[in-house]
Amino acid sequence: MATPKPKSNNQFYLPDLCAPRMVLVIVLVAELIALVHTLSRHSVAQDFWIDLAKSSLFLLWSALGGAWLLCNLRGWLAKRSVRDGTLLSLLLILLTVTVVSEAAVWLGQYTGDTDLFPTNHLDFLLRNLSIGLIVGVLLLRYFYVSHEWERNVRMEAQSRIQALQARIRPHFLFNSLNTIASLIRSNPETAEEAVEDMSDLFRANLREQRDRISVKEELEVARIYQRIEQLRLGDRLKVMWDVNDIPMRAKIPSLTIQPLLENAIYHGIEPLSEGGTVTITGKMVNDDISIRVVNPIPNATDYTRHKGNQMAMDNIRQRMNIAYGERAKVTVEHTDSEYSVAILFPREGDQ
Amino acid sequence: MRVLIVDDEAPARDRLKRHLEDLSDYQVLGEAENGKQALDVCNTDRPDIVLLDIRMPGLDGIETARYLSELDNPPAVIFTTAYNEYAIDAFDAQAIGYLMKPIRRSRLERALQHAARLSSPQLKAITETEPRRPRDHVCAKVRNQLQLIPLDEIYYFQSDQKYTRVKFSEGEVLIDDSLKALEQEFQERVLRVHRNTLVLRHELLALDKGQDGSYYARLRNSSDELSVSRRLVSSLRKAIKRG
């Protein structure tokens, strides 16, 4: 059996063996082993049923006894590392086998019945221990693998949700829903448009991350985002667009400009009572496209250290890096009152 | 019951206002876009209940609640928030009224019925679980009115028995904050010149030596005689040189 690394923060892999379903499984498995064991020794003649009964009796006692022991000590085992827990479980299984074997031998001597009970003491015990060891190892390995598999499935689902959350800020989602709820009564038409805008924005967010879209489409997503935020922030938010110099049909990884705008609004405009202006400038630098987003900042040191901002910037860097490698650049500059992010990437896909 | 709505977003305020109009027992006393406006309204008209958005520019909801609780007859506070990034979740939602946006009318009604003043242990717990930024003002209570004093206008803090005296452009007031707490919070903006005095960095011009050999701090905007501890003289000189 491969020795797994100890993982202290995880639940022990052994399932709850006292659960009714598990007890049934244990009984069935014990019977199956008894059957295999008996079949391998006899043709289906007259000794067969007696022998099956003997094996069943022994195996059921061992299996249920072992399960009961492991079930009751599960909490204690879970506190150990996976390796120690496994070794201790194995020892407990062997202990059960020993006790049941000894009991069988003792009963044989006590009743004098040599038909039903074993006669060769040491040979009997050693054979049982070997079988116990092999079956025990196989069982534990099975439990471990199925536990790991379950855990992986769960973790994968979790990381998907986290990835989605990284793209859609819950704060933005609920504030927008609140805005729409408010507009439904006061201004139904605007509310309708806001729902359409939200749909487009979510569709863009659910697109495969690796997809590339045209600059024009990406700018449209950013403008949709701006429209939604505008409803909420009103006059406090002003956005200056200066992007006529870049080729609209060139390709860009989806969700690069929109998150920059989102960041600028969340960290730059929202904390200012009087609001401010975000400037988005696109221009050609030789054969590269450069897009710069500038926003005012309330407090320089606070801003750059902000964890959310860091995460968003890391995310954009990573995407540009995956798409273009060394050929793309993300630069962050800031003064006491302004924060500026520029992305530079090769013009591709429109020539 | 008179209710004050505080939220920096107009649609959010509109929605709460409409909900309240539908509820007969409550009337909207007014609206405020941020914490500072909320304090102003509370100074003049005393609302019974304040619906307070947590995330607001300038003075946020939690700090506003902290100041409001210092009033002699403080209003009940219900926090509102779009997303629970705040640790307020850890508290009993009934004990500390808070509502998640978009807010249902039935939940609002129930919260209003149960609205209660925040107790000081509750406030302390909320404040402590939040990562606080240093403020850019202090808050004083003068004749049961709350007054925000921007740090830029303050000359110095001086401890005065139980209270701390704040000397600023419009005179002086007493606040509850201890000198030690102020020094910790505003460490980048204040300098300790004496056991009982903190001077705002931007106010300190020079150290003068008196005839008796002791030192005094010379301030930009105040002629008050402030003693300087001898052991602090050399470090203060360095701070002045650095500007």
Image (cartoon, rainbow, N blue to C red):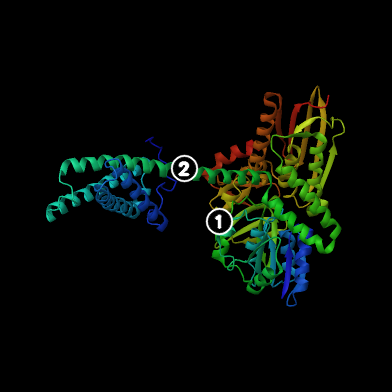
Label 2 packing within 10 angstroms: few (<14), some (14-19), many (20+): few
The residue tagged with tag 2: helix, strand or loop? helix
Please state the horizontal and vertical placement of residue A93, each as a whole percent of the image.
29, 46
Q: Nearer the viewer, residue A23 or B54?
A: A23
- Tell whether A128 sits left or right of A271: left
Amino acid type, callout 1: Glu
- Tell whether A149 sits left or right of A315: left
- Tell whether A266 sits left or right of A240: left
Taking the view exactly as shown, the residue that stands out farthest to the right is A244
Q: CA distance from mark 1 to mark 2?
A: 39 Å
Q: Chain of mark 2?
A: A
Q: Is residue A135 above or below residue B106?
A: above
The residue tagged with tag 1: helix, strand or loop? helix
Q: Is residue B18 above or below residue B178?
A: below
Q: Chain of mark 1?
A: B
Is disc 1 in contact with disc 2, using a CB cutoff of under 8 Å?
Answer: no
Please state the horizontal and vertical placement of residue A238, each as a whole percent of the image.
83, 46
Q: Nearer the viewer, residue A184 or A292?
A: A184
Q: Nearer the viewer, mark 1 or mark 2?
A: 2
Which residue is drawn at the image coordinates 69% and 37% (left, top)? A209
> Which quadrant, please, contains the N terminus of chain A?
top left
- Quickly name the residue at label 2: A148
Residue B32 visible in the picture: no
Which residue is drawn at the image coordinates 62% and 59% (left, top)? B165
Taking the view exactly as shown, the residue that stands out farthest to the top is A286
- Quickly name the residue at label 1: B128
Label 1 packing within 10 angstroms: few (<14), some (14-19), many (20+): few
Please state the horizontal and vertical placement of residue A218, each as a whole percent of the image.
79, 38
Amino acid type, callout 2: Glu
